[in-house]
Amino acid sequence: MQTAMPRTRAWGNLVASRSGQRCPASHHPIRRWLTRNKPNRSPFVTTASLVPTNCMHVHTRNVQYFSTGKSSDPTKNWRFDQRNMRNRRVSKKDSEQFAKANQKAHQKSNKPPNVFIRELMRDINNLQKRLDNLDSLPAIWDRSTRSKLYDTNSQEQRLAVLNEGRQLLETIRLAVEKGTLKPLEDHGHETSVLMERILKLYSETPSTTDTHSSFDECQTVLSVMDAWKIDRQHLHVVYSITAATREGRWEDASNLFWSHIDPEDSGYRPYDEDVANPVGLYAVARFAQERNMPVIEPVMDSVLRMTMVSPFDQDKYLLAAGTAIGHVGEWEAFIKYLKNSFDASRLGQPLVAAVMKACIANDSSQQAMEIFDEFVVSKLSIAGEWQWAGGENPLHPLCRDLALQALGQSFEEGSSRRALDYYNQIAQEKYTISIDALVGVFEACVNDGQWPDAVDTLLSMIAKSPSDRWVVTTESLAIEVMEDSAAKSMDLLTRLGSCVEVTMRGCNSDGQFGVAMVCLRLFQIWMPADYLLPYQEAMSSKGHEHSENSLIEAIAPIICALNDADGVLSASMVALCGLGLNQEASNLFKLVEGILVYVDGKIEVDRLEQARDLVSYANEGAERFKPTKLHGGWEVSYRHIHRLTSACSILVHSKSCPSQEEMRLLSTAAAVAVRSCTVEKQADAGLVLLKWIEETLASHAASLRSHESALALPPTDALLSARMGAYLSIEDADAALELFQNEIKNSQGMTKWRLSTCEAITAFFRVGHASDAMDFFGKVVAENRSPDIFCRVAEGLVDEKDWDGVAKVYKSALSCGCLSEELSILAMKAAAAGRIDGRVRVFRNILGETAKFVGTQPLVWAVAKYWILKRAIGFPNICIVMWWNTSNPHLNEVEL
């Protein structure tokens, strides 16, 4: 009888007594049983017949099923198993269906080999599609959601797939029996692939009751393979172990894993353990936990044993061990192993990376960074003795990548600066970076409250070409030079939506809702159009034509295309609510949900769970705050942003140098967009937009390699004033002045800078240089005479409480014909605050001069501006202006 037990001393080491002494291998019950039982191999071996009851959990149904009525003839055993299975698990009303299935199996087995294999593979693919359409199964270590998913109606459908998979296995047996399929001669590879696909089906049909056992079915398949002398490949074992782990049969899973990696039992056959899903190592760890034994030793013994067979995969095995140990929560014991084990110095920084990965999996980022600092940064202990890449760089890129992931989990002040330093190192050295490490950079910035750094990092990310090989999956060990990387970053673009979500979340937390929407738009421009096309077509099919005039229809496709659609949708809804567009936020959720259902045919319950919770908040806000012109203004701003970014993208992808007229139009559009954002109190959004345009044009100029100077937006008065206004809106007058001075230092005259001059005067007053503002006003007023410049000077003097200065500016504007309503109100405010003699006469004169300028009667103008005037000069003075000499003037106010 073939045994699946590992012949290794590691199991002896695994069984430790309470006192800490190791049990000799010969005392282990599995080892004793192996030494006693060495019969000949049997072609059909089951779980119950392989393993004695004193050392394995054998279900009663398995013993009853596989221990009675057996014959020495393998074919009869097979038929008995199938008949017994049907008698126990199939009701009478289903007997006709099984009869038809058996008849169909006989018909298929009579077909030519190529036709038979093709049809069988088609049937297996159809079953796999049925499983793929169900809710995804949780990871093998995700215990919290296991029962929730397994108790749904999908379990019945999975059981139906399992039954059909059994029938396909019977069909294969009949084909082999009739000679249609010859696994020992012409069809060994094809048969192996068919068995692999059936095992995959079994691994995705876990049992929640005693009605069936997927692992028992996998054992049957493996026994059939042994009978037909088909070698067990890596995936055969992985799927079988997965089935065992989903049923909590840790001993069965670990024994199967050990039998496959034991050279004495299976030969020197490499085992390709998955870093992200190390089912074998995880099963070993859980089995050790189940027996209250040390976890690290058997896991590391497994790693060393696999390394003996495949030394080049040592780093991958170590990182897989870190994943497994992290998911069983034994990270503290792993740290002790790192510090005390004799193997640590030989394994080097990859072992440090594995320990860091285990810490990160348990949200112990602080401990991960302590390990990184102790064993890598300070170059102490093993990290100082072991170097990679010929000793040229003591810092292993994988450790640095994991450090970024840990920094993303940290809330320690200053983590963002350190994360950005490592990120810049990676960019300078032109190394690849994992997705989780990249997200860690954004998380560190947001946790530190540095949303501008997160936005800058996002701009640097989208400045790269989508086809560049610069980002890899988190599970990849290929953290290497970009030129040597075989990664396909194009396949990972949709997973970068997490970076956008974190950036938008950081912007929203600081009230930068407009910046959040701009970031989403810029990422949408960066994404290849092919990724968005299916969702745009779905939106059109649902009666929503993609249009830049509809904000939600413009952003819905990019949200649907991203893997983290829930997070990005939630951040978008929060941003819209912050901009006063509550109803649009609710409508956006409905649109995105409808598109996903239309494209995917279904939507998992928890896919938009976070965004669904925000719908009620958005609806409540829509009822409480009715849209006004101010609230609805962001839709106009976004329309300008959409058009501007589209035009810039077209120019860049044209592969030619844009004309001067095109650049002038682009500059005008940029000025309009920035000024619109400033009006909506989202000035930072306009500045971020301008920064992206400038970097995009500079990159385009570099790609053209022309002898011409770098492309830049033409320095127009509209653009300069819009940018200065944005800086003034965010209380950065120094930046506005510096920008103005750099722009006009080579200019001949100030005539072409009318709008910018007004912003400069305001900036002078904001920085406390009132005298410089007046001097500048005196120099430019002759050639730049406009009502706006007089009004800006008066506003600055009002802030300085220079009431006489306001009066002088008013008289100067009146004499120059540059009077305005705003200036008249400021003059009245100065007269009221200055406590001058003859205030009544001054008020009446200003009122008459302004009414004449507007072309109306003084009292009519006063009534039209009543509430503005009242706030400016106060109720007693407004009574003078309105000629209210009654004893109760408040009644006159009520009549207005």
Image (tube, grey):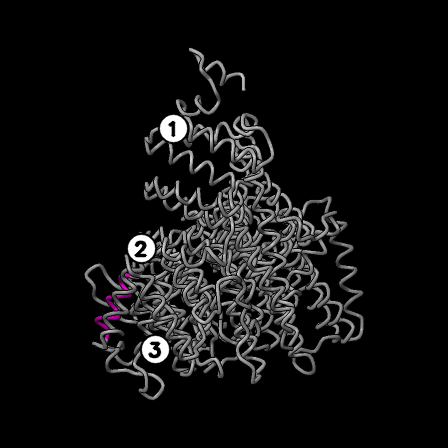
User: Which residue is denoted by mark 3 in the rendering?
Assistant: 396
Could you say which is closer to the camera, residue 646 or residue 227? 646
Q: Which mark is residue 208?
A: none
Q: Earlier in the sequence, mark 3 or mark 1?
A: 3
Residue shown at 49% from the left, 18% from the top = 893
Q: Earlier in the sequence, mark 1 or mark 2?
A: 2
- Residue span colored magenta: 332-341
- The x and y percentages for residue 626 are 57, 32
- The x and y percentages for residue 698 are 52, 74
User: Which residue is denoted by mark 2 in the rendering?
Assistant: 411
Residue 712's place in the image compared with 582, above or below, is below
Secondary structure type for disc 1: helix
Outermost residue, top side: 887
- Label count reads 3
**Distance (Cα) linking label 3 and label 2:** 25 Å
Which amino acid lies under the numbered mark 3 shown in the image of this protein? His
Mark 1 Cα shell of 10 Å, populated few (<14), some (14-19), many (≥20): some
Is 333 part of what is drawn in magenta? yes
User: Which residue is denoted by mark 1 in the rendering?
Assistant: 839
Secondary structure type for disc 3: loop
Residue 35 seen by the camera:
no
**Distance (Cα) linking label 1 and label 2:** 60 Å
Which amino acid lies under the numbered mark 1 shown in the image of this protein? Arg
